[in-house]
Every structure is written in structure tokens, then in C-alpha cells.
Amino acid sequence: MAAQVDLNKCTMCGGFTQPLCVEICPDHAIRVQGNRVVVTEFLCEDCNECGCACPDKAITVPLTKVTF
């Protein structure tokens, strides 16, 4: 299972050019689509970089899937 985004918590925090999770994802698995953050499951390697960077704590990865 890929990273999960709680859209009720996500404020699209804004890094330099896009939300921090999009900027930090090493797999390019996160993007903005239709004014919301979307995770492409088959690209996500469950590293939790996005969850660590999210100031809203809106992204979680099931603990059984974390690969670091």
C-alpha cells in the first residue's frame, strides 16, 4: 500500500514551486492533480519521505510497509 493522503488535513503547504511532499518524493510518485495531492501507488516505494516532510501530518504510510 502506498502513502495515504488525508485530504481533510492537507493544506497544499507550498514548497518553492509546489507542495513539499511533491518536491521531496524521490520516486516522483506524488503530484498535484485537480488542486489536490495524488499518490501514484505503483511508483511509491513507501519510504515515508513525504510523510516526514508534511507540516500538516496529512500523509501516512502503514508501518508494516515502511522500507527505511
Image: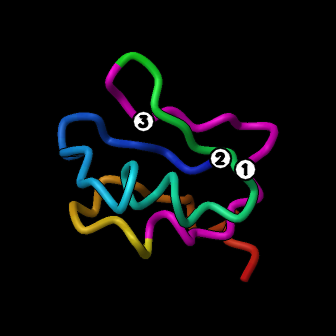
Magenta span includes 42: yes
**Res. 37 mark:** 3
Q: In 3D space, how far apart are the residues under numbered discs 3 and 1 (Cα atoms)?
A: 13 Å
**Horizontal placement of 66 versus 18: left or right?**
right
On the image, numbered disc 2 is attached to which residue? 2
Amino acid beneath label 2:
Ala
Q: Residue placed at 56% from the left, 50% from the top?
A: 3
User: In this picture, is 6 found above or below 20?
Assistant: above
The residue tagged with tag 1: helix, strand or loop?
loop
Q: Are marks 3 and 2 in contact (CB under 8 Å)?
A: no
The span from disc 3 to disc 2 (Cα, nearest Å) is 13 Å
Q: Give the range drawn in magenta.
A: 35-51
Q: Which residue lies furthest to the front in this view?
A: 17
Label 1 sits on residue: 44
Q: Is residue 45 above or below residue 32?
A: below
Please say if the residues under marks 1 and 2 sit with CB atoms less than 8 Å apart. yes
Across and down, in percent, residue 12 comes to 26, 45
Q: Position of residue 18 (x, y in %)?
A: 39, 48
Secondary structure under tag 2 reads: loop
